[in-house]
Image (spheres, rainbow, N blue to C red):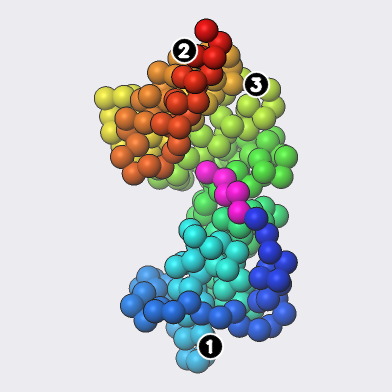
Amino acid sequence: MRSSGTRSAAKATQASAGAAPELPEDLADVQLDAEVRRDLRGLRKDIAEDVARHLVAAGVLLEEEPERALAHARYARSKASRLAVVREAVGLAAYRAGEWTETLAELRAARRMGGGPGHLPIMADAERALGRPERALELARGPEAAELGKAEAIELLIVASGARRDLGEFASAVVSLQVPELDTARNEPWSARLFYAYADALLAAGRREDAVRWFLNAAQADDEELTDAAERLAELSADQAVDQ
């Protein structure tokens, strides 16, 4: 789940210095979600249009150029810091760019403004990245976790299992993922990631043969290439050949 993006001081500080980052080309065909546009209606028209353009840019750049996305989101925040949707955009871009402290600050602000569980798995993963697995587990056990939809609940389960591994609780990390959704007969959007996390937990617990079987299950379920299960299988097979 965690992003491994590198940081660029020039890009990271561009928005905070007040200058609008350069917009990508061909944004005209990309539209903001209608709900987001409604949230912007309270702003002066010219400011709303400016913020909208930079939120669109942040969304377009998020996967491939997260630091540029973060610069656009930060610029939008400089114009509309009291809107939950803007703070959420900054938090998500910060997460992709590996800015863990900013991720937590912005997503907490968005939750205060907008309510709801608000990207709890991402917040827990940011806590792990900051070396605070106990806090990640606190979020996973908190009352807001019960409000999550199925996909986010599974994602939080995966993060919590990783936090247990961080603490050296390898057996608990395995057991915590043994939920009804861990079923190869089911092909859900989260199946590949859940199977992969289970394989990873098994491997960390020293259960290599079981891990290989679940990496295979993950690879077979991963139609959208959400994981590197096939590569992990190849690595384990190569290591086994060397051992023999």
Per the picture, the main secondary structure of the magenta-coloured stretch is loop
Secondary structure of residue under mark 3: loop
Q: Nearer the viewer, residue 129 or 114?
A: 129
Q: Is residue 159 visible?
A: yes
Mark number for residue 209?
2
Reading the image, the residue beneath label 3 is: 169
Kindly indicate whether the residue at mark 3 contacts the one at mark 1 (C-beta within 8 angstroms): no
| Cα distance between the residues tagged 1 and 3 | 50 Å
Q: Amino acid at mark 2?
A: Glu
Q: Amino acid at mark 3?
A: Glu
Q: Residue furthest top?
A: 244
Mark number for residue 28?
none
Say left or right for 7 vs 207. right
Q: Is residue 231 magenta?
A: no
Q: Amino acid at mark 1?
A: Ile
Q: Tell me what residue is drawn at x 44 percent, y 25 percent.
A: 233
Find the magenta span and give its range.
1-5
Q: Tell me what residue is drawn at x 57 percent, y 45 percent.
A: 2
Measured as percent of width and height from the top left, residue 126 is found at 63, 47
**Vertical arrangement, residue 124 with respect to residue 180, above or below:** below
Reading the image, the residue beneath label 1 is: 47
Q: Tell me what residue is drawn at x 68 percent, y 83 percent.
A: 18
Query: Nearer the observer, disc 2 or disc 1?
Result: 2
Q: Tell me what residue is drawn at x 49 percent, y 20 percent.
A: 238
In the rendered image, which quarter is residue 234 located in?
A: top left
Q: Nearer the viewer, residue 229 or 35?
A: 229
Residues packed near mark 1 inside 10 Å, few (<14), some (14 to 19) or many (20 plus)? some
Secondary structure of residue under mark 2: helix
**Vertical arrangement, residue 106 with respect to residue 195, above or below:** below
